Every structure is written in C-alpha cells, then in structure tokens.
C-alpha cells in the first residue's frame, strides 16, 4: 500500500475543499463546513472501497475496471426507485 493512501486521500481532500468552496455559490444556505465534511467522508469511503475491490483481483487494470462497474451497479437502485415508486409507493 505504501504511499498510495496519503496520495489518493490528499488528492481527494483537495477536490473536497474545492467542491465545498464552489458549492457555496449554488447553495448559499448550506454551511460550507458541513459540505466539506460530507465530501471528505465520501472521499474516505471511495478510497476504502477501491482498496477493498482491488484485493479481489490480481491485476490492477482489471481491478480498476471491476471497481468502476461495481460502483456504477451500486448506484442503479437509487436511480431506479423514483421510476418504480413515483411518489413513495401506496402506503
């Protein structure tokens, strides 16, 4: 693992700071610290997810592609629910 975790975490932390700063324009009533905390936690979750999936494969290129497809497949239920249950269901 070496220096990959600090490198990836640092890059994503910089992105989180930039996204929180840019997010103050379209969302003026949202606290920037809350947005920053959300983006930092999301970054940490993505780094740990990538290392978890990488352990399942023996080649880096296959692991990267597999991680991408697993992540995209995990988003499908969230995109499908508004279509299937338009207004929250019957009850």
Image: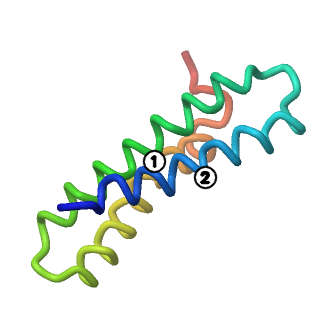
* Quarter in which the C terminus is drawn: top right
- Name the disc covering residue 15, or none: 2
| Number of marks present in the image shown | 2
- The image shows residue 23 at horizontal and vertical percentages of 78, 39
| x 45%, y 35%: residue | 41
- Name the disc covering residue 8, or none: none
Mark 2 or 1 closer to N-term? 2
In this rendering, would 71 be left or right of 23?
Answer: left
Q: Quadrant of residue 85?
A: top right
| x 65%, y 42%: residue | 17
Q: Residue furthest top?
A: 91
- The image shows residue 21 at horizontal and vertical percentages of 76, 40
Q: Nearer the viewer, residue 72 or 18?
A: 18
* Quarter in which the N terminus is drawn: bottom left
Q: Nearer the viewer, residue 85 or 32?
A: 32
- The image shows residue 56 at horizontal and vertical percentages of 12, 66
In the depicted structure, whether residue 81 falls above or below residue 32: below
In this rendering, would 1 be left or right of 41?
Answer: left
For label 2, count other residues whose C-alpha is less than 10 Å away and answer few (under 14), some (14-19) or many (20+): some
Q: CA distance from mark 2 to mark 1?
A: 26 Å
| x 41%, y 50%: residue | 9
In the depicted structure, whether residue 55 falls above or below residue 44: below
- The image shows residue 38 at horizontal and vertical percentages of 55, 31
In this rendering, would 50 be left or right of 83?
Answer: left
Q: Nearer the viewer, mark 2 or mark 1?
A: 2
The residue pinned by badge 1 equals 77
For label 1, count other residues whose C-alpha is less than 10 Å away and answer few (under 14), some (14-19) or many (20+): few
Q: Disc 2 on helix, strand or loop?
A: helix
In the depicted structure, whether residue 75 falls above or below residue 86: below
Q: Disc 1 on helix, strand or loop?
A: helix
């Amino acid at each position: 693992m070496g220096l990959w975790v600090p490198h990836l975490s640092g890059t994503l932390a910089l992105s989180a700071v930039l996204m929180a700063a840019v997010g103050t324009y379209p969302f003026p009533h949202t606290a920037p610290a809350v947005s920053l905390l959300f983006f930092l936690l999301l970054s940490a979750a993505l780094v740990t997810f990538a290392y978890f999936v990488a352990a399942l494969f023996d080649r880096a290129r296959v692991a990267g592609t597999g991680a991408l497809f697993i992540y995209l497949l995990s988003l499908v239920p969230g995109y499908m629910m508004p279509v299937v249950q338009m207004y929250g269901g019957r009850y």
